[in-house]
Amino acid sequence: MKLAIISHTEHYKKRDGTIVGWGPTISEINHLAQDFEEIYHIAFLHPGIPPPSSMPYVSQNIKFVPLKPVGGNGIGAKLKIIGNIPTILNTVIKTLKQVDVFQFRAPTGIGVFLIPYLTLFCNKKGWYKYAGNWNQDNPPLGYQLQRWMLKNQKRKVTINGHWPEQPKQCLTFENPCLTVEEREEGLQIVNLKAFAPPFTFCFVGRLEDAKGVQRIIDAFRTLSSMENIDTIYFIGNGEKMDHYQKQCKDLSIPAIFHGFLERQKVFEIYKKAHFILLPSDSEGFPKVIAEAMNYGCIPIVSDISSIGQYVNASNGFLLNPMNTKHLREVLLEAISKSKDELTKMASDCYLVASKFTFAIYRDKIKEEIIEP
């Protein structure tokens, strides 16, 4: 069986000609390659140097089908999408003729016209993966439209979390991010991790206010003392990175900004960190939460989307209301807990992470989507 995946995943060409793409998505596809004769991935090929978080395909049966990058903010960017609709549609139609089944990854700008096309004019077996916040109250118009289309059709849709009145074709799927070997390694780390001050924190994601970076800095600046804080690692990049760095330096906040890192280097930070911070405004269920929990990083995260269905008082701290004042209160609560309390929370984190393995994901696709 041959599979086509259609996504907005950023790809780049290295100097030696190797195609690399956004690590979490490429890793997922590398694991799916075990279950399909061929996989064609239709996605955007960007110019420039790939970030360290990019990785290559590892299987010869994965074929990358490039699209010219489109999308972004502003009227000009939207018009650029419209102008490229014929080219994108032709690429999708040509690729679909070569496969038996497709997966479309939403929400994305091209989903506004590709979901209607796939729904109305494609007779191939297929399913949609909605990676955003399925229960978001006021999503952007494009996301809202895509979610409405996915709620009102027959093909299967995989989503984050369980929700009241969930349409029958919408299946709850955990976002896969862990191998069997990483689960075994995580167990060793959790058993050895010592929860004693000073504590280490980490943030993994885009460096922007919407992801909570300013909220983190503002919360730490209000602490009366830093004696129980060792280091705050910020992993990721963004336009305001230099601004955030300067703030931390001026405020004597012990922060280290790494920019994007390779997957294994991120995991090395999880291994030594006690807490992962993600006080963001909007999420689906970020893979970084499950990855960090696998290594005994206790989450301090926003109570949004499906996050609260996996993180609770026994294994982490949920931010609700989500503001600087409450984050400060939670930070003080977290670092005041006893070693035994935090060790127990880390063990519970490890158990929750068991749901996010690639093996479980592959089995669910086979049993709930491909075979029925």
Image (spheres, rainbow, N blue to C red):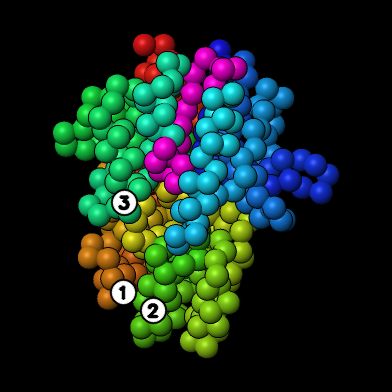
Residue at label 3?
141
Q: Residue at x 42, y 16 (%)?
A: 123
- Of circles 2 and 3, the one toward us is 3
Of circles 3 and 1, the one toward us is 3
Q: Does the magenta stretch include residue 178?
A: no
- Distance of label 3 from label 1 (alpha carbons): 28 Å
Marks 1 and 2 close (CB-CB < 8 Å):
yes
Please tell me how many numbered marks the rendered image carries: 3
Q: Quadrant of the C terminus?
A: top left
Q: Mark 2 points at which residue?
A: 218
Residue 155, quarter of the rendered image: top left
Which residues lie in the magenta part? 96-113
Mark 2 crowdedness (10 Å alpha carbons): few <14, some 14-19, many ≥20: some
Nearer the observer, 233 or 66:
66
Residue 206 visible in the snapshot: yes
> Which comes before the other along the chain, label 3 or label 1?
3
The percent coordinates of residue 197 (x first, y second) are 45, 70
Per the image, the residue denoted by label 1 is 324
Percent of width and height locating residue 66: 65, 38
Q: What residue type is labelled 2?
A: Asp
Q: Circles 2 and 3: CB distance less than 8 Å?
A: no
Q: How far separated are the C-alphas under marks 1 and 2?
A: 6 Å
Tell me, for residue 103, which label it has, or none: none
SS of the residue under disc 1: helix
Q: Quadrant of the N terminus?
A: top right
